[in-house]
Image: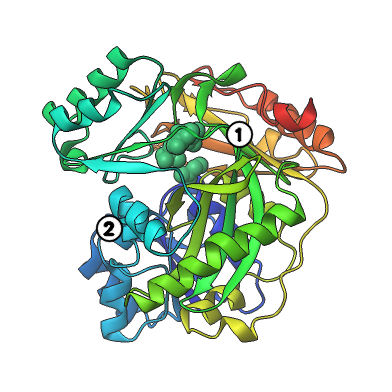
Amino acid sequence: MKILIVGSGGREHALGWKLKQSPLVSELISVPGNPGLARLGRCVAHKVTDVAEIAALALRESVDLVVIGPESTAAAGLADALAHVGVPCFGPTRAAAELEASKAFMKDFCERHAVPTAGYKVFDDAIYAKAYLGDREPPFVIKADGLAAGKGVIIAETRREADEAIDQILFLRKFGTAGQRIVIEDFLPGEEASFFAICDGETAVPLLAAQDHKRAYDLDKGPNTGGMGAYSPAPVFTDAVRDQTMEQIILPTLRGMKAEGRPFVGVLFAGLMITPAGPKLIEFNVRFGDPECQTLMRRMKSDLAPVLLLAAQGQLAGAPKIVWDERPAVTVVYAAQGYPDEPLTGSIIRGLANAEQVPDVEIFHAGTREDEEGNLRAAGGRVLNVTATGATLRDAVDRAYEAVNKIDWPGGFCRRDIAWRALN
Ligand code: AMP
Ligand code: GLY
């Protein structure tokens, strides 16, 4: 198989790393890729939303499968374009990507199909939104409707903060057109987990759960980020919770999406709150989590390539069972100073080869570039993902930080407490 991966982050590097190990895969092409992916195959410089160019490339190269990494590519309609030219695509159509691209669509959908989620109301008028908060108790959960790179959610502790968030989104358009509408939700207490299922429009194969760390600094302090580290398994996500999640959330969603003429193909990522009353959906994403994907790929023992191809072809029911490594895995995100607000790019990173020598460690590139002299430089917010497996979670964490400590990068920082919940 010749596979084309769309994306340039650590998630895509991890997918490429895993797919390239398949005896079925002869060639990997990445658009636009990164220096890590460049070690695994050719990189072609299109933007991830250049749908027509990517579809033309897939056709010209006679690729057997396109794998969509980021939601922006799905929302731009790459799967739709590929369907027209008959190239199998692992990733949702634009209509199916609405599950992530519009929180209002997602919430209304959950209501139509009785998927357990927080109570909510949608507003496009700040006056009504504020009036709605009038007789409610904090914390208030306020979300921009559209795609805002994980930053469009404000948990306000006071009325004043909530009003300010509403004004920021609806009046001042802090998130641009993603903030034409807002969703106000009930606050759900509990512990969070990310769960993933591979879908072919009709059938869903459960993967594993992982736990992410959204805040930038240790002890869950600082601003929200795309994710600073992840580990799997997540003790809070028991087999019973997984079965409930499949029965109450994933399968009704697949049936509902098919019934509404938007069959879902790709990874359905359920961001969950594990409450005393069972798992409740916080959000759907229509792609792998980043950095959860890196962690999961380290635990997957069986071949990923046939599973993705069969899902793209609507034949997942015949897929071989996925086998997992029992050992825990962890990912530490090494980010550029200033992330998430204003990451300082351009600093030189040394010592990577040394760090990669630590047993059971793999390092994925997330936001790097190579300069003319061959130096590796920071080129994004989240720059490197140091992943490790170990006999125990403690082991995996120690290995990951042993590797982190061998990386010589004064321009970077990472959290030092990844997996603290499970280790305590
Ligand atoms: P989201 O982008 O929708 O995943 O939201 C970002 C983060 O906000 C989540 O990971 C949760 O920590 C928090 N959050 C979102 N919605 C709720 C809710 N209804 N109740 C409690 N916390 C929430
Ligand atoms: N790490 C969470 C996400 O990918 O949205």
Residue 320 drawn above or below residue 180:
below
Residue 40 visible here: no
Q: What's the residue at 61%, 63% (across, down)?
A: 246
* Category of crowding for the residue at label 2, using alpha-carbon neighbours closer than 10 angstroms: few (below 14), some (14–19), many (at least 20): some
| 84 displayed left or right of 240 | left
| 230 displayed left or right of 239 | left
SS state under label 2: loop
* Category of crowding for the residue at label 1, using alpha-carbon neighbours closer than 10 angstroms: few (below 14), some (14–19), many (at least 20): some
Residue closest to the far right: 391
Q: Position of residue 161 (x, y in %)?
A: 31, 16
Q: How many numbered marks does the figure carry?
A: 2
Q: Position of residue 131 (x, y in %)?
A: 21, 26
Q: According to the image, label 2 marks what residue? A: 46
Residue labelled 1 has its Cβ within 8 Å of some atom of ligand 1: yes
Residue 273 drawn above or below residue 129:
below
Which numbered marker is on residue 190?
1
Q: Amino acid at mark 2?
A: His
Q: What's the residue at 51%, 31% (across, down)?
A: 214
SS state under label 1: loop
Residue 399 drawn above or below residue 161:
below
Q: Quadrant of the C terminus?
A: top right
Mark earlier in primary sequence (2, 1): 2
Distance Cα–Cα, label 2 vs label 1: 41 Å
Residue 298 drawn above or below residue 243:
above
Q: Position of residue 189 (x, y in %)?
A: 56, 32
Q: What's the residue at 34%, 67% (across, down)?
A: 96
Tell me the mark number nearer the camera, choosing from 2 and 1. 1
Image quarter of residue 166 = top left
